[in-house]
């Protein structure tokens, strides 16, 4: 078991599939108490049961990251259960990419809501508790698209650039003074359900071509576990994990 993960209370948003699910399983195996949050409750319960059967500690809480009330409620439940919140993995995200001139304005709104506001509502829900504890760790999922824009990725990339700015701001404001670590994780192409949210036929065709080159969500989970496991005086501020094939 990993030393600085054991017994930590870790909330993971978007834990019903992909990177969130893999992270929940790995951290639970490593001795953390994991709280899995997402909208699809049935899937959360199935994963929680798997974790428990493997000897890990896990609970499921239904929460939509777009709802500040849901996120506050999530933090309240965790405080009542465990008395503390050690780590928040702000992982929930969607990627209905398209060309700007397709004017899929509702999808732009959804990406901004889930990928940016969702991250902020997560921070708002846990920050007071972490400041009170004078310790904590907030891990935000950006992307290689948080560094580089490509045709069809403008809005998604904008949300992931924003996550980088938020993560860096959090680090500058909190880490040295209140001991709250801020880590940015930037995955490259990873084999998950993320591409299911694409509705543009052009982008779907591209996704179908390259999806086989993606890495396992376990590779991203290991990066997250590494950042948590480092000693409290060590901040892993940024990790990028890419497939070797791309
Ligand atoms: P998945 O689609 O497998 O997982 C996304 C998760 O987000 C799901 O569990 C989903 O759960 C949850 N989610 C979506 N909307 C909401 C919402 N409103 N409230 C709560 N949860 C929500 O994709 P990934 O695992 O790949 O994505 C995880 C993160 O990694 C995302 O932020 C993504 O942008 C990022 N990323 C992924 C890459 C990839 O290639 N896969 C590359 C770079 C970054 P539910 O529907 O049950 O609510």
Image (spheres, rainbow, N blue to C red):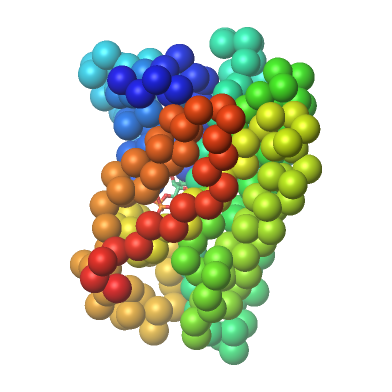
The residue drawn where x is 23% and y is 18% is 54
In the image, residue 4 lies at what x, y percent? 45, 22
The residue drawn where x is 47% and y is 32% is 230
Residue at the extreme bottom of the image, as rendered: 101
In the image, residue 141 lies at what x, y percent? 52, 51
In the image, residue 191 lies at what x, y percent? 29, 57
Q: Which of the pair 1/128 is nearer the observer? A: 1
- Note whether residue 44 is visible: no
Q: Which of the pair 24/194 is nearer the observer? A: 24
Is residue 228 rendered to the left or right of residue 136? left
Quarter-of-image position of residue 56: top left
Is residue 244 rendered to the left or right of residue 177? left
- Vertical side of 153 occupied by 65: above or below: above
- Vertical side of 14 occupied by 244: above or below: below
The residue drawn where x is 70% and y is 37% is 175
Q: Which of the pair 21/227 is nearer the observer? A: 227
Is residue 142 rendered to the left or right of residue 34? right
- Vertical side of 73 occupied by 81: above or below: above
Q: Which of the pair 43/28 is nearer the observer? A: 28
User: Which quarter shows the N terminus?
Assistant: top left
User: Which quarter shows the C terminus?
Assistant: bottom left
- Note whether residue 29 is visible: yes
The residue drawn where x is 76% and y is 19% is 132
């Amino acid at each position: 078991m990993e030393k600085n993960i054991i017994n930590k209370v870790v909330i993971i948003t978007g834990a019903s599939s992909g990177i969130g699910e893999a992270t929940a399983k790995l951290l639970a195996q490593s001795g953390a108490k994991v709280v899995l949050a997402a909208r699809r409750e049935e899937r959360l319960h199935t994963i929680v049961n798997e974790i428990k059967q493997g000897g890990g500690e896990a609970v499921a809480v239904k929460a939509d990251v777009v709802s500040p009330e849901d996120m506050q409620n999530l933090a309240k439940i965790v405080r009542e259960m465990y008395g503390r919140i050690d780590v928040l993995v702000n992982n929930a995200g969607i990627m209905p990419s398209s060309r700007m001139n397709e004017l899929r304005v509702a999808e732009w709104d959804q990406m901004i809501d889930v990928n940016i506001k969702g991250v902020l509502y997560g921070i708002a829900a846990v920050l007071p508790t972490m400041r009170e504890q004078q310790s904590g760790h907030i891990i935000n999922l950006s992307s290689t698209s948080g560094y580089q824009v490509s045709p069809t990725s403008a809005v998604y990339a904008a949300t992931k650039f924003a996550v980088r700015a938020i993560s860096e701001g959090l680090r500058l404001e909190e880490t040295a003074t209140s001991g709250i670590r801020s880590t940015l994780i930037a995955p490259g192409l990873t084999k998950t359900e993320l591409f299911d949210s694409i509705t543009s036929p052009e982008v779907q065709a591209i996704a179908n071509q390259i999806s086989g080159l993606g890495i396992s969500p376990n590779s991203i989970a290991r990066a997250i576990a590494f950042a948590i496991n480092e000693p409290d005086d060590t901040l892993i501020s940024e990790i990028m994990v890419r497939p070797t094939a791309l």
